[in-house]
């Protein structure tokens, strides 16, 4: 069979509630709206874990953190875990990554044949939480509310510099793939760091949202004393007591966040235009690693199971998948088996050890009966948290906290915990049984603690004396670029031209 090319567009920390059916009408995102019109749109897609590294490892492997061991932003992603890049490459694909994937450990490829950029975040064990010290705040790398109080306008930032580079090298690669020097089908993953905080945007995008009606959260801040136990831990982890957050801070943060969605839209539009200009066809996937609370309930960033944090946009434009809205809950961990199905790649050998499932059939009316599972065991937690989305229900469990049960149809903002409501005792018991069948929380906790303890020892040891960084170094051989004296100028110019003869 002729295997399709695949373009995966990944963004960072994009709240899925802003994509009820593609981008919300009020977002200035013409390119994403055009992509939505030809895509299967999953309204209720969830991350495998609401944090960068564990969410991305789950997305790439189709496995939850309890299986991968990538519990947090400093846990090693083992080299022996197959990713979609391994599966596709094994089947004859050229696999390439431009941008962020937050791999931790000496393996910085995980099945990609080529990386075009380095990562934006460190690859070592320095960001390891410590369950032995509950409530500890590690100031030099924990989130704090400075991202909110510092929101505003800038023409260049650390993140803009990164994403400008990610887009540039991805465009150059799409052009190069068109030249036809490699007959293999390709899978190019382009992974941006926006709209992740800090909430700072270029003025041209900032100005788009001057009169935006969505600069205030729907759910006003809930007093600290009235927050659930995990939310209190997140407030503390984010150092909230040392910041005075004003309504203007909130408005500016949300405005910059929306502006950065428009910034990304321009970047994605450039990539899709190059794809069209070079007459290449590809399956296109658009997804985020997790969401952002954006001030709802007074919460920011991610690290919780609330919809703003755990729900993500997901759109797939592929032959055989009918454009339209799918409301069945799905997960980013479903993408690896789905990509395998769309590319005609047999993943049977790894299927028993994969948590995700093929969702391509949902576009054409197939049904899904299994719940969507989410895990969290990183900073801001003192023990693992697990969640199930099943139909209209969401059930959250942690050994340290009271159970949570939400009816998302009747209560989309998750304001009423039904876990203690006698009228819903049957639903609670059913979901609790499903959760207990899936997770042994005591074992999960022990595994996380063992991993953390090992990493603290290794990190401190490796920072003594000579230090060899694991951060990816992009390989660029200048002697093979453009025109050099071991090349025939005539052949070079002709081979690098596309299209030819026009």
Image (cartoon, grey):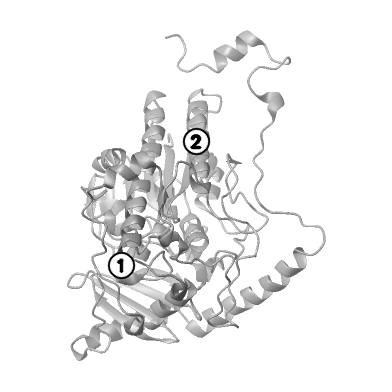
**Quadrant occupied by the C terminus:** top left
Up/down of 189 relative to 101, above or below: above
84 relative position to 202: left or right: right
Q: Which residue is mark 2?
A: 170
Q: As displayed, is residue 146 above or below residue 138?
A: above
428 vs 501, left or right, is left
Q: Earlier in the sequence, mark 2 or mark 1?
A: 2
Q: Secondary structure at mark 1?
A: helix
Position of the N terminus, as image quadrant, is top left
- Which residue occupies 43% across, 40% down? 6
Camera-side residue of 331 and 252: 252
- The mark lying in front, picked from 2 and 1, is 1
- Residue 127 location in percent, x, y? 60, 66
Which residue occupies 55% across, 75% down? Answer: 137
**Mark 1 surroundings within 10 Å by alpha-carbon count, few (fewer than 14), some (14 through 19), many (20 or more):** some
What secondary structure is found at the residue carrying circle 2? helix
Which one is nearer the viewer's eye here, 336 or 396?
396
Counting from the top left corner in percent of width and height, residue 239 is at: 48, 73
Residue 370 at least partly seen: no
Residue 84 point in image, percent of width and height:
50, 50
Residue 296: numbered disc: 1
């Amino acid at each position: 069979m002729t295997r399709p090319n695949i373009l995966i567009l990944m963004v960072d920390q994009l709240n899925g509630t802003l994509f009820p059916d593609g981008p919300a009408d009020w977002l200035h995102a013409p390119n994403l709206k055009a992509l939505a019109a030809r895509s299967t749109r999953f309204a209720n897609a969830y991350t495998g874990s609401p944090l960068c590294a564990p969410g991305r490892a789950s997305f790439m492997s189709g496995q939850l953190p309890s299986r991968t061991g990538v519990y947090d932003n400093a846990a090693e992603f083992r080299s022996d875990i197959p990713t979609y890049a391994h599966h596709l490459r094994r089947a004859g694909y050229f696999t390439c990554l431009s941008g962020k994937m937050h791999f931790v450990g000496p393996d910085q490829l995980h099945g990609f044949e080529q990386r075009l950029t380095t990562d934006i975040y460190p690859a070592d064990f320095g960001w390891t939480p410590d369950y032995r010290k509950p409530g500890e705040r590690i100031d030099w790398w924990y989130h704090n509310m400075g991202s909110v109080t510092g929101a505003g306008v800038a023409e260049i930032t650390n993140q803009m510099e990164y994403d400008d580079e990610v887009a540039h090298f991805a465009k150059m690669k799409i052009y190069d793939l068109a030249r036809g020097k490699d007959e293999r089908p390709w899978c190019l993953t382009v992974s941006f760091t926006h709209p992740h905080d800090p909430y700072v945007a270029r003025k041209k995008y900032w100005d788009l949202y001057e009169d935006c009606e969505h600069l205030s959260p729907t759910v006003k801040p809930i007093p600290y004393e009235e927050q659930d136990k995990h939310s209190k831990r997140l407030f503390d982890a984010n150092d909230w007591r040392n910041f005075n957050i004003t309504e203007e801070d909130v408005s500016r943060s949300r405005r910059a966040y929306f502006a950065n969605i428009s910034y990304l839209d321009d970047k994605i539009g450039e990539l899709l235009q190059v794809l069209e200009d070079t007459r290449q066809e590809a399956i296109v996937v658009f997804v985020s690693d997790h969401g952002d609370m954006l001030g709802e309930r007074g919460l920011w960033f991610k690290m919780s199971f609330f919809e703003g944090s755990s729900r993500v946009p997901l759109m797939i434009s592929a032959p055989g998948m009918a454009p339209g809205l799918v409301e069945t809950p799905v997960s980013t961990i479903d993408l690896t088996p789905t990509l395998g199905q769309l590319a005609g790649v047999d993943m049977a050998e790894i299927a028993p050890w994969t948590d995700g499932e093929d969702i391509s059939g949902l576009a054409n009316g197939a049904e899904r009966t299994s719940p969507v599972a989410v895990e969290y065991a990183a900073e801001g937690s003192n023990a693992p948290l697990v969640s199930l989305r099943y139909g209209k229900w969401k059930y959250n469990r942690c050994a340290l906290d009271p159970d949570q049960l939400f009816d998302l149809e009747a209560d989309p903002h998750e304001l009423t915990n039904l876990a203690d409501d006698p009228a819903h005792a049957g639903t609670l018991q059913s979901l609790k049984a499903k959760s207990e069948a899936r997770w042994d929380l005591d074992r999960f906790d022990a595994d996380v603690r063992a991993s953390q303890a090992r990493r603290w020892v290794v990190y401190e040891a490796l920072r003594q004396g000579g230090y060899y960084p694991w951060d990816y170094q992009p390989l660029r051989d200048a002697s093979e670029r453009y025109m050099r004296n071991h090349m025939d100028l005539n052949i070079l110019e002709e081979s690098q031209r596309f299209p030819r003869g026009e």
